[in-house]
Structures are given as structure tokens and as C-alpha cells.
Amino acid sequence: MTGYTIAELGDWNKKLEALAAKNGLNYYDQHFELCDYEDMLCCEAYAGMPSHYPHWSYGKAYERQKTFYKYNMVGLPYEMVINSDPCIAYLMRDNTLPLQLLTMAHVYGHNDFFKNNRLFKERTRAELTLEMFKIHANRIRGYIQDPSIGPAKVERILDAAHALRFQTDRHNSRKLLTRKELASDAATPLPESLKGDLLGFLAERAQLAAWEKDLIEIVHYESSYFMPQIETKIMNEGWASFWHYRLLQELNLPANLYLEFLQRHHMVVRPLSGHINPYCLGFKLFASLAESPDGLAKIMEVRALERDQSFLRRYLTRELCQELNLFSYTIISNSIVVKEVADETGWQTIKNALIMNVGLAAIPKINPVAVDNGTLSLEHVFDGRELELNYAKETLKYVVDLWGGRVELATTLNNRKIVIQCDTDKLVLVK
Amino acid sequence: MAIFSDGATGHSDRSAGDRKRHHELLEDAIRRNLGDIIAEENIIGQSSTKKFKIPIKGVKEYQFIYAHSGGAASGTGKEKKGHTVGKAAASGQKQPGLGSVGNQPDEDVYETEITMDEIVNYLFDDLKLPAMDRNKYGLIETERQFKYAGYQRKGIPPRLAKKRTVVEKLKREQSLKRNHENTGDDNRLPFREDDLRYRRVRTAARPCANAVVICIMDISGSMDQTKKYLARSFYFLLYQFVRWRYAKVEVVFIAHTTEAKEVSEWEFFHHGEAGGTAISSGYAKALNIINERYNPDAWNIYAFHCSDGDNWTDDNATAVGLATKLCHVCNLFGYGEISLNQSYTATIRREFESNLAASNFVIAVINKQDDVWPAFKQILDRQAVGEAHP
């Protein structure tokens, strides 16, 4: 560590926690773990989980990240935080003190968000997170080591389930069913409760062995755990950035430390030309909301109730669009062409384009609609945006892997309704 | 109150297993895409260390995604409606900064660099010259190998014979005991220089099968640039393959128009000529060379011929006759026909198909660059020939 000790960090933390409490943040117990950059890369590859089941895609994520880091294409995350109770965050040992303090305050923001946002409260059980991931990891390792199963068969199912990991129930409408409902569900080939949940449907109805269904269930669980994070990326980062900025201002840092903090802060929340920086957008939105008369109460309410889509719909104003120089674009033969700029008429279009591309709205929704004679029919919920055909074909093969029979997907391409078919021999037909 | 812990323990490399598996999948992907490289890249005459950049298609993590058609982004404030502000990039760079709590899929762009040597390794891993007769041993053809033969007292450390050294020490220990000499206070007897034994090494010469590959190419006027290029691609693969797989296989190059001559490797791959076509001339030359230098009793002979099949009609009968003779003396005779436009003009392929019945004769058709590798495999994947013609 450079120029400070863990004890000193603890002292600073005491002050930070006092300020956080004074401001009304309400968070889980916090564990900070100091680590080096290799650990951080590893952590990032496994979504921060101390225990996670093995799959090659995590090895790929690690190497990819490491390569990018090596060639200076991205910086390392300063911190990694997971939604659990107690909340675990990793701090990089080599970071300077001001950066460490920024990160810690930032982590308290995330921690508060995890504990209070509606989506997290309804869909995740933070006190079970670590244990669940560990149990799942052990179960999958068990299947891998089982001589009658082995790594290849496990990988086949995981590959396929990962391809469909976002094709789950988006509204958390899965309720506990009564015995009667269960009985009637069992009798129908496609029960009402699974109509919006392709992965869940496959876990229940595909022609698979019990352990294979268990693998799908595990992936399904992980999806529902990460879903709130995907749905609140802008809010979550904005909230954490808002609080690191406010807490560190109140912390009365010595001038030299404060200067470095400001510099780092501006790096984090600067707009990225050609992209949407969630830190920046979220920070600006919360900061502007906090300026209203009873601002603090208002932002506390917003962080508890909204998700990215509703957050932007309600609070993204024309002034903010202009301040951030937002523009909307279309892609015409590989060129990015500006469609609207943030003026009187254009800003609503920009706002809508933005809302269409955050959270799960950026991922197409594919639903099971019918089972007929062993053929599973799927439907793409078409909202004007077309599927990437090549990806759709390849992903359909994975559906066949799980389903064990012919699968058809109905979608719209070039204003024409088409059906993509895939048989068990993996021949894909488009008609 | 927060807890701080320092994870200063020597951490285990937890992603090692997953990285290894990812690498295996990458290699698979490279292997699968090699056919495309041969189709796309100008590989002829490249040195073995030249690096090729190849995109890997195999390890994408497919999901249902939208075709990228638009969105919103921050700008500089100078954007104007209808202006082009850039190219749609395949991969989005992540911004430096605070950790990501989401998990967004983004586009994979994989490009890896491999050398000609590696390509050759991947390509030819499971191929060999079919129907090689191991009994046709030669005296000159040898494979140098180191073999251990006995022990000696002097040597270099890597050749230290540990077991033998221990035995020598035990022998010394026993003799000391027998002579009732004091072996020291704690009965510990250290090794001494005298105990050390090293392995002796001699080079063994192992005879291996004699083999010669005869490449016959039609370089007449009807073989235009593209056709010649295809033929050369085929031979280049063949040549690389033979060089890679066999240390001592001889290669003979024959180029023919109406008459044939033996040429050097460089000439074969770089020269162009024009004129009429008499395929028989090439075959006659090949038979001639076999007679003079490669006795079929002692040599495994492989002959390959590439042509557009546009032969002088008068010559057809002779050509088929000589081809039959070649089939008799060769382990394998492969004919690759380069027909760009798949015209229905009579080519010598028809003649071969109807008049040449030998199980060690293979025909492959090359219409375009993509066909070169399949044709190559088709000709060499003739393990069955071995059984038919021992």
C-alpha cells in the first residue's frame, strides 16, 4: 500500500460512515477486502463472487480484460462491489488514499442502493447471496466430477443456458402456485406461468435429465440475481457517484488530497463522446433532483422506487439533454448518422431512443408460445427493432440443444414476417 | 462498522482451469477456420515465419441480440442533423473507472496471429501420405535419433543417471561395511564424485521408408492466371505438408505444355508459360524419372497432376494409357481438375472416369479457391487405399 495503513483507512472509514448515517444512508454491514490487480481481474471475471462455478466464458472474460488492461484500452475498476449482506467490496491495494476514499464512499452508495431499491428488495435475498453462489458452484463441480456426467456434458448445457440467460421472466411474476394451479399446469404443454420465461420453461419441460435441469435452474437463479443490476445500471452508478461526491466534500480533506479526489471524480463522471457514460448521466440526474426544495427526501424516494427506464422517463429533462450534448443516431451502411440533436423538437426523440437502449430494453425478448407435436414455437416480441439474424440462428441451435426437438422462431425482418427453423440436426432454415 | 481485511495470502489462480478450456476452444476455432484462411490468404511462397492475422469465429457467446441500428449518445455539442459522426464500431470500449455492477454482453472481436508453421501444424495434424509401404526401406534415408547406451563416469549434468549413481553409492557402502571400516558417526554416507554415473549417448540411424512425390502441373496457355494460382495453391499445400510430415521425402517438379520438363521448386511456383497441351507428355516425363531414379520396388511413389483438363483430343488415349501405367507404379495417383466455369466441354476427366479403373487413382475438382483444401483432403484422405493396395 502506498503511504497509508489499514488502520488509517479504518479511521477514515469511521468518519465516512458517520457522514453516511447523518445523511440518511441505510446500508448493510460493509466488508472491504484489499487485493492486488490480478485478484481484481479475477473478481471481475466472476462477477465479484468469491465462489462461482467454472465455465470457459469466465476464463475468456479474464483474458479479455487482462489484454485490454495490458494495452491500456481500459483502466481497471477501482473497486468491485457485490449485492450481499454483509456487502463485500474489493479495494485495490495500489490505489492512492484519495482514490481509496472515493471508492469507499462510492461503495456505501451502492450498498445503500442494494438495500433500498425496490427491484433488489423484491428479487434478491442479499443475506443468501454468497451461500447460494457457493452451493451452486459446489453442485456444478459435483456434476463435473461425476464419472457418469463429466465436464463435456456439463459444458454443453451451460453453453446453451448461458445463451438464453436473459430470456427469463422480466417482471418477476413467478408466484408460488396453489396445488390446484400446479396440477392444471402440469397437464398443459405450456403453462401460463412460464409463457414469459423461456429459460424457466426449458428447465421444467425440456427432455433433459434431472441434473441437466438443475444446471439450467442455477443459471436461471443467477440471471434473476443480476437482473436488478442490469435494470438499474445508470441509477446505481449515479447514486454511488452522487454520494461519493457529497460525502467526500463533507469529509474536510486536506487540500492536496481533495485536489486529487476532484480530479478522479471528474474522470469518473465525464461524458464519453459517442457513448453514454452511466456514471455521468446518473450523477447529473441525481444532482439536479437534489437541488429541488426537499431534494434529499426526493432522491431517497427515487432511488427506492425507480429503475433506469422509469428514472429517465420521469426525470431526464431537455436542459440535461442539452447540457450533455445528447444526440440520437441511426446506422446507415456502417456510418453513424445523427438523427436528432437536443433542441426543442429533438430531445424527446433522443430520450425515447435512450430509454429503448437501457436495461433489459436493450435485449430482445423471446417467448415460448406453443408446443405442438414435439415442436417448440417461439415468438420474438417485435417492437420495430430487428434481431441480428446470424446471432438468432446460432442461439436457436442452443434452444434445440436444450429442448431436444425442433424449434421455430417467428420474427420480423425487413417488414416481412419470417420463421427461423432449427432441427435436431442443427440445420437452420429461414422462411 | 466496516471490516477491513487484507487478502495478502498467496492467492490461488482460480481462473486457470477456465482459461485452459477457453484456449482449447480457441484452438478448435482456429482449426475449423483454417480452410477459410487458405481460401482467403495469399499463402503461396510465404516463409514459414510469416504471420497471418486470422479472425476467430468459434468462441462467440451467442445470444438473441438486436441488429445495431441506432441509439443515443453524448456528443460534443457540434453535431448537426444528418451529419455522419463516425463508423459503427464492432466493439465498445469500456470506460476506465469504477467497477461495473451490470453484466452487458458486448461484441467479441478476436484476432489471433499465427505463423505458417503453426497453420501447417494444425492443418496436417491428422493427415499422412496414404498407402505408405514401410517395407520399402532405403539405405540413405535415415532418421537421426539419440539413444542411451550404457553409462560412463564423465558427462554433462542433464545426462546424470540418478538410479545408477545411487547403486554405485550403495555398492561403496556395502564394501565399506564388509571391510568393517567406520562409515562415520551417524552412519551417513554422502555421495562422492566417484559415485556419479552419466548416460552414454550414441546416435542411432533408423531407416525409414523411401518416398517421392511427383508434382505435375499443366502450364499451358489455357491455364490462365487464376487457374495456375489454384493449381499452385494446391501444390503449395502439398509441398508444405510433405516437408512437415516427412523428413526425407523427395519432391520432383514437372511442368508441361506439349512437352514436359523437370523444373526447380522456385520455377514451379513462379513461372508461367503458354502453348498447347499434351497431358501425356507430363506423364511420360514422370514415368521416365521413375524409371531412372525411383525404382517402384524400393520407393513409395506419389504422383499428382493439376490441369484444366483441356487436352488435345489426339492425346487423350495416350494420356489415359500412361496414367494407367503411373497407377501401376505409384502408391497413389491424384488428378486435380481446375475448371473455373464448370463448362461442359469434354475434358480429360471424362476419359479418366470412364477408362481408368484403378483404386489408387483419385480425382478432385477445384472450381474456386474454397475448393482447394477440400480437394487436398479428398486426395490424401485415402486410408482405404492402403488396404486395397498393400
Image (tube, coloured by chain):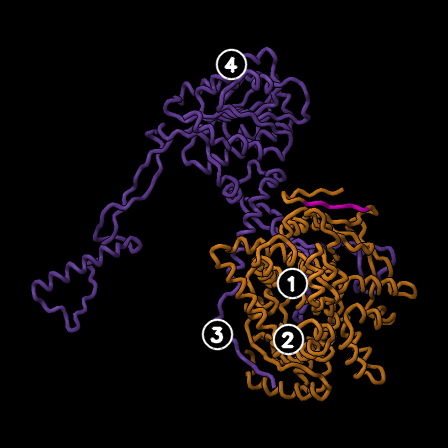
Chain colours: A orange, B purple
Residue shown at 50% from the left, 75% from the top:
B8
Chain for disc number 4: B
Chain for disc number 3: B
Q: What element carries label 3?
A: loop
Residue B282, compared with residue A323, is above or below; it is above
Q: Position of residue A350 (x, y in %)?
A: 85, 63
Residue A126 numbered tag: 2
Residue B212, compared with residue B21, is above or below; it is above
Residue shown at 48% from the left, 68% from the top:
B12
* Quadrant of image for the N terminus of chain A: bottom right
Q: Position of residue A186 (x, y in %)?
A: 68, 59
Magenta stretch: includes residue A421: yes
Q: CA–CA distance between discs 1 and 4?
A: 69 Å
Residue A295 appears in which quarter of the rendering? bottom right
Residue B38 appears in which quarter of the rendering? top right
* Quadrant of image for the C terminus of chain A: top right
Q: Which amino acid does label 3 sit on?
A: Thr
Q: What element carries label 1?
A: helix
Q: CA–CA distance between discs 1 and 3?
A: 33 Å
Which residue is disc 4 drawn over? B321
> Which stretch did the figure color magenta?
A417-422
Which residue is disc 3 drawn over? B9
Task: Give the dominant element type of the magenta stretch: helix, strand or loop.
Answer: strand
Magenta stretch: includes residue A169: no
Q: What element carries label 2?
A: helix
Q: What residue type is labelled 1?
A: His
Residue A28 numbered tag: none
Q: Where is residue A41 in the image (x, y as percent from the top left)?
A: 58, 66
